[in-house]
Image (cartoon, helix red, strand yellow):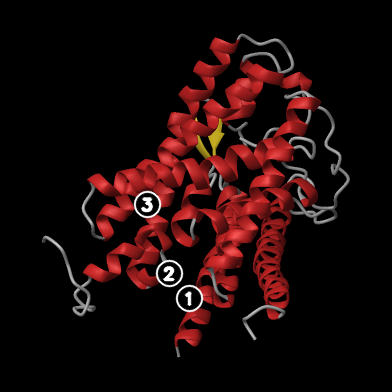
Amino acid sequence: MARRRLAVFVAAGLLVALALAFFVSPEASSKPDGLNKVAIDQGFADKETAHRTADSPLAGYGVRGVGSDRLSTGLAGVIGVGATFGIAGGGFLLARRARRRTAAGGVER
Amino acid sequence: MHIPDGFIDAPTSAAAGAVAVGALAVCLRRSGEMLEDKEAPLAGLVAAFVFAVQMLNFPVAAGTSGHLLGGLLAAVLVGPYLGALCVSVVLVVQALLFADGGLSALGLNIVNMALVGAFAGYGIFLLARRVLAANPGGVVAASSVAALLSVVLASVVFTLEYAIGGTGGASLGRVAAAMIGVHVLIGIGEAVITGLTVGAVLAVRPDLVYGARGLRAASPTAPQAATVGG
């Protein structure tokens, strides 16, 4: 029961995150953020070097090959939500398993 | 607040990388000890939510935007150790997949956004909880105050990093003033988003808010727990 309620909560939270990423993120401000604005104003913005993953098909929060900017940003957001959920949730489980296996030789079982 | 490659020199970036790796190793061990398997989907949700909301840049001043950093929010929801890990996952995914935040600057970004928010921010949160009411409103208020201050603190830490290894020769005083000034405004946004999110989770599942754990003993649904004072 408690487990099921947790699953409902996580599913609802994920839906909120997906909706924000898909529907709202294309509306976000595209102005430079605080740090970038300071870098421009104080004259060190030109020190930025090319990003090593600039060739990623998702670089700059867009999906390469998707014509509509709105859709491209929204899909990139959905992919990011899925990736972060999977890596954080899955990574945490793996870390717990590894820990239990190490502990298994001890008093735990 | 994502530092691209080139703003901070290689030795300083490498030193921050070492700090980040060491701190995250401690976080991994501590959260593995303290938490249970059922918290795994929560960790995923916190990372996914922070990722989504970080995409929502809001305007703060003429020609400038800001977005949630999320370190303090994550810490209040799942504790500082797991919270720092969640935000670090977001930063790694952003750097590798979305080319946001430099790869050599990843350690700097983890220090500024994950560690400062989750640990310094959570310390401020605990202090604020002491002076605020021990009820859900007090937890929301403490979260908002700590969120604002953690963003300002992150801008101070960036300025220190720039002082140690910054490129471009900008005046430190002017960088400090400009960074702190704009991040007070961004911090207000951080405070609003953090307060709304913590308030919403407290309303539906107060038991899932790590930073509100002390509250349950005082709740009317748990009369078996002794309440001190009134």
Q: In the displayed structure, does residue A13 sit left or right of residue A67?
A: left
Dot 2: chain letter = B
Residue at (31% x, 44% y) in the render: B128
User: Which of marks 2 and 3 precedes in the sequence?
Assistant: 3
Q: In the displayed structure, does residue A24 sit left or right of residue B208?
A: right
Mark 2, other Cα within 10 Å: few <14 / some 14–19 / many ≥20: some
Q: Which is nearer the eye, B173 or B218?
A: B218
Of the two numbered discs 3 and 2 in the rendering, the one whose residue sits closer to the viewer: 2
In this rendering, does residue B219 appear at all? yes
Q: Quadrant of the C terminus of chain B?
A: bottom left
Query: Type of residue at label 3?
Result: Gly
Mark 3, other Cα within 10 Å: few <14 / some 14–19 / many ≥20: many
B57 versus B34 height, above or below = above
The residue indicated by pointer 1 is A9
Q: Which is nearer the eye, B147 or B128?
A: B128
Per the image, label 3 sits on a secondary structure element best described as helix
Residue at (43% x, 50% y) in the render: B193
Please identify the quarter of the rendering in which residue B116 is found: top right
Per the image, label 1 sits on a secondary structure element best described as helix
- CA separation in Å, label 3 and label 2: 15 Å
- CA separation in Å, label 1 and label 3: 19 Å
Query: Type of residue at label 2?
Result: Leu
The residue indicated by pointer 3 is B195
Q: In the displayed structure, does residue B179 sit left or right of residue B99?
A: left
Residue lying at the far front of the rendered structure: A107
Mark 2–mark 1 contact, CB under 8 Å?
Answer: yes
In this rendering, does residue B51 appear at all? no
